[in-house]
Image (cartoon, coloured by chain):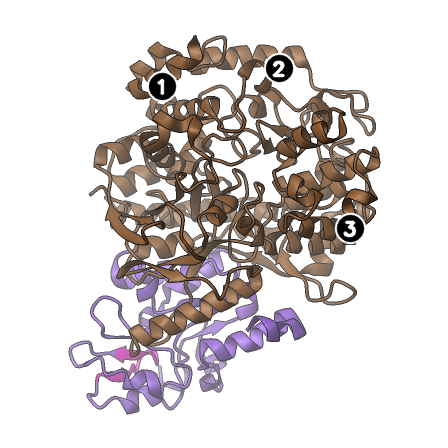
Chain colours: A brown, B purple
């Protein structure tokens, strides 16, 4: 067994309520590593031939929660959630931080593969003794704080009963879906702790579709052995020392929670009122306002990471008293702040907490809230549809709308399909094209970084990414962007990336893989599989690169305000970058991975299935 | 050094980030690998955001030491730490009961009791916490450590209740 791995994955068939241990041979792990890479391999091998027919919310889809060899051993432990995405119908590797991955590895598992659908709400418990399926009736329908409280107690009591005389049992860790996932809202996240979401991809809905509320892990074994313990011990201290010697305003002191003002005011690339603008100069929305008034814990970290980019925010007075959440980080600050016309830190924290408690993705779901508000502004949906007015900045109305969506009530049922699918439906219902207000790339609502001012994200990053609107994984030149594919596959946090990471990887695994191998070969295989799945798509929506390897229409409207007023995304420049990217990565002029490229990489099976797209 | 002037690890729960690098450092030192559940300091998070590094407080009267029917525990003359004779330990868990904070636990590998030994006077856990500038764990020496240390020997549940109340106010009642 290669080092850095626990050596097995838990495979669960919820339909038959059976579990078994499975493992992969070294060659597969060496090539696909873990996380996003291994997810692509597993999904392709099992579903590739019939990809277009697989309903992401049907029992035939597979839900994955995978770690990687660096997870928990390297600072910034995350778990990668994947499956066929109900947003883009492709494969997205969506990661979230917390203690679940370290507990999972300590229990002896590198990941969990969940197929089928349970006949009743269940959760999966994983301990040193293996996996078991347990009844989740006590926690179904519960929002995050109560869910965590109940399952923590329940599982601790269970473990204490099982092994009573070993001393105090520490709490287990879990990934879970909220009420939004249970309702199969396509913008439902998978979460850890109270607010650490894997939002892109909509995998909370996949959990819900399987009647799976949570996966809980508690391990008492050591983390897996590594190839060079002596080297690793030094590297472990060195990576952190270098981090600690850096200017630590970001992310340690400020997290990304200071950016809700900066990205709008300075780089003019922050969503404001559904991206109608990308600039604001609301100083009351500045980082220090969040920090000095609400952050009760300025340094909040996950296992083995001194990065502490999270901040615990608690509201102690006023109408939102008792609210608590993380940060919010920049993405949620932007999406549940300016993008809803909200410029008050307390209101933003309240909405951010609400959205996380509901398990509704703070990026994707909040994008839909703003889309609805713009339709209301334009009179396309009205008070008759909603039962209330939906004006920019009206916190209570946005709360009501979020709850309607999560319960799939009335127009909420339409909006629960995510921004793009809702836009298609509403266009039909109202006889007016509203897709131009839908800010997404291939069904994935876009991250809170615009391209129009030219000061922030590169347009091609979103347009050609196999992760679509995901702001953490844009493409660049088919070389440097493989870095993110690696971090998602070794499954560690990009904030803790270091120039020592490849030495670290070799010290853990004992393999002689180099960054060059990854950037030229290994990473490419993963990108091509993701691309193949994305282009096959289905069953409800398929993408045409000619029109869909592009940005949302809004990103071509001139900016109406701010220092970059009248600037917009240069369409010609994007087309040129796209052409260049296709050539470098090895896709034909239609955007389909070339046969000879796939065959050179040993992806003959992918090539065969893609033949139908080349005709 | 006399028992009255020992090394001691101060703990500031409000400053604990929950990074658990103390667990990693401790297990590197004592186990030669990363083994959070075998770490002499274990960080509990029973309520989100309420992180409790749980480790021996070196009570002045050492109730664990006197409780052991097999004389497996002793207090070090040099550091004041509780030392475990693993040969003598029978895994009876009586010392866990005797500890006011239920701090000792049985090793997940060999089932022998595990108690912080202060790394012989130069603890590893505090180094990583200090390097990261969290300052949740730090070494104090001499008379400053000579306070009612037993007050710190509390269960994770007791400590969580206090720290959660400090952080969340009234809301803590709902979360605990």
Q: Chain of mark 2?
A: A
Marks 1 & 3, CB-CB < 8 Å contact: no
Marks 2 & 1, CB-CB < 8 Å contact: no
Marks 3 & 2 on one chain = yes
Label 3 or label 2, whichever lies nearer to me, is: 3
Residue to which mark 2 is pinned? A574
Residue B119 painted magenta: no
Residue to which mark 1 is pinned? A609
> What numbered label is drawn on residue A497?
none
Residue to which mark 3 is pinned? A397
Marks 1 & 3 on one chain = yes
At 36% from the left edge and 19% from the top edge, which residue is drawn?
A609
- As drawn, B79 above or below A549: below
**Which region of the structure is painted magenta?**
B72-83
> Horizontal and vertical percent for residue A338?
76, 42
> Horizontal and vertical percent for residue A611?
38, 13
Q: Check disc 2 and report its element: helix, strand or loop.
A: helix
Q: Check disc 3 and report its element: helix, strand or loop.
A: helix
């Amino acid at each position: 067994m290669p080092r850095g791995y626990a050596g097995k994955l838990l495979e669960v068939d919820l339909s038959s309520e059976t579990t078994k241990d499975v493992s992969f041979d070294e060659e597969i792990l060496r090539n696909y590593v873990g996380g996003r890479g291994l997810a692509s391999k597993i999904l392709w091998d099992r579903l590739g031939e019939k990809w277009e027919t697989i309903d992401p919310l049907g029992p035939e889809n597979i839900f994955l929660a995978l770690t990687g060899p660096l997870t928990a051993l390297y600072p910034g432990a995350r778990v990668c959630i994947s499956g066929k995405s109900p947003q883009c119908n492709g494969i997205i590797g969506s990661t979230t931080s917390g203690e679940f991955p370290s507990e999972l590895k300590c229990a002896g598992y590198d990941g969990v593969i969940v197929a089928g659908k349970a006949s009743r709400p269940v959760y999966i418990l994983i301990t040193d003794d293996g996996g078991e399926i347990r009844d989740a009736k006590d926690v179904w329908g519960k929002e995050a704080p109560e869910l965590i409280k109940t399952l923590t107690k329940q599982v601790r009591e269970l473990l204490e009963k099982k092994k009573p005389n070993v001393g105090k049992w520490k709490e287990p860790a879990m990934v879970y879906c909220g009420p939004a996932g249970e309702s199969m809202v396509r913008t439902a996240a998978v979460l850890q702790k109270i607010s650490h979401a894997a939002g892109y991809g909509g995998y909370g809905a996949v959990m819900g579709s399987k009647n799976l509320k949570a996966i809980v892990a508690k391990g008492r074994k050591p983390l897996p052995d590594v190839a060079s313990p002596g080297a690793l011990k030094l590297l472990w201290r060195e990576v952190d020392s270098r981090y600690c010697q850096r200017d630590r305003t970001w992310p340690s002191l400020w997290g990304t929670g200071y950016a809700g003002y900066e990205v709008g005011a300075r780089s003019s690339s922050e969503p404001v009122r559904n991206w109608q603008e990308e600039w604001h100069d609301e100083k009351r929305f500045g980082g220090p306002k969040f920090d000095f008034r609400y952050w009760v814990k300025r340094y909040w970290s996950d296992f083995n990471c001194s990065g502490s980019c999270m901040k615990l925010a608690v509201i102690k007075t006023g109408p939102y008293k008792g609210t608590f959440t993380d940060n919010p980080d920049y993405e949620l600050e932007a999406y549940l702040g300016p993008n809803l016309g909200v410029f008050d830190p307390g209101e933003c924290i309240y909405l951010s907490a609400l959205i996380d408690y509901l398990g509704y993705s703070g990026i994707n779901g909040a994008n839909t809230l703003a889309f609805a508000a713009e339709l209301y502004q334009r009179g396309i949906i009205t008070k008759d549809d909603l039962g209330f007015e939906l004006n920019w900045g009206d916190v209570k109305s946005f709360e009501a709308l979020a709850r309607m969506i999560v319960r799939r009530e009335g127009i909420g049922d339409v909006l629960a399909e995510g921004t793009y699918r809702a836009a298609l439906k509403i266009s039909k219902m109202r006889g007016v094209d509203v897709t131009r207000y839908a800010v997404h790339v291939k069904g994935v609502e876009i991250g809170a970084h615009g391209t129009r001012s030219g000061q922030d994200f590169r347009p091609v990053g979103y347009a050609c990414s196999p992760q679509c609107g995901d702001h953490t994984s844009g493409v660049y030149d088919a070389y440097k962007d493989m870095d993110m594919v690696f971090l998602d596959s070794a499954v560690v946090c990009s904030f803790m990336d270091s120039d020592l990471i490849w030495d670290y990887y070799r010290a853990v695994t004992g393999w002689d893989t180099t960054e060059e191998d990854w950037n030229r070969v290994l990473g490419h295989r993963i990108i091509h599989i993701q691309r193949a799945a994305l282009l096959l798509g289905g069953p409800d929506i398929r993408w045409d690169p000619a029109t869909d390897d592009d940005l949302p229409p809004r990103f071509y409207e001139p900016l109406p305000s701010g220092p970059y007023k009248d600037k917009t995304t240069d369409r010609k420049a994007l087309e040129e970058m796209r052409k260049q990217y296709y050539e470098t990565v090895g896709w034909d002029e239609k955007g389909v991975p070339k046969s000879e490229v796939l065959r050179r990489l040993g992806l003959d099976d992918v090539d065969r299935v893609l033949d139908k797209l080349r005709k | 050094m006399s028992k009255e002037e020992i090394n001691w690890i101060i703990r500031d729960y409000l400053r604990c980030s929950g990074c658990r690098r103390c667990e990693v450092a401790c297990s590197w030192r004592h186990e030669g690998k990363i083994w959070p559940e075998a770490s002499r300091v274990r960080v509990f998070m029973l309520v989100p955001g309420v992180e409790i590094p749980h480790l021996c407080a070196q009570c002045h009267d050492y109730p664990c030491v006197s409780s052991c029917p097999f004389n497996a525990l002793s207090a070090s003359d040099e550091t004041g730490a509780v030392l475990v004779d693993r040969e003598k330990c029978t895994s009876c868990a009586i010392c866990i009961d005797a500890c006011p904070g239920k701090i000792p636990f049985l090793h997940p590998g060999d089932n022998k009791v595990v108690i912080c030994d202060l790394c012989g006077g130069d603890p590893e856990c505090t180094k990583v916490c200090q390097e990261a500038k969290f300052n949740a764990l730090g070494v104090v020496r001499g008379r400053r450590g000579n306070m009612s240390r037993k007050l710190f020997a509390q269960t994770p549940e007791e400590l969580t209740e206090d720290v959660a109340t400090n952080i969340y106010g009234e809301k803590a009642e709902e979360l605990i």
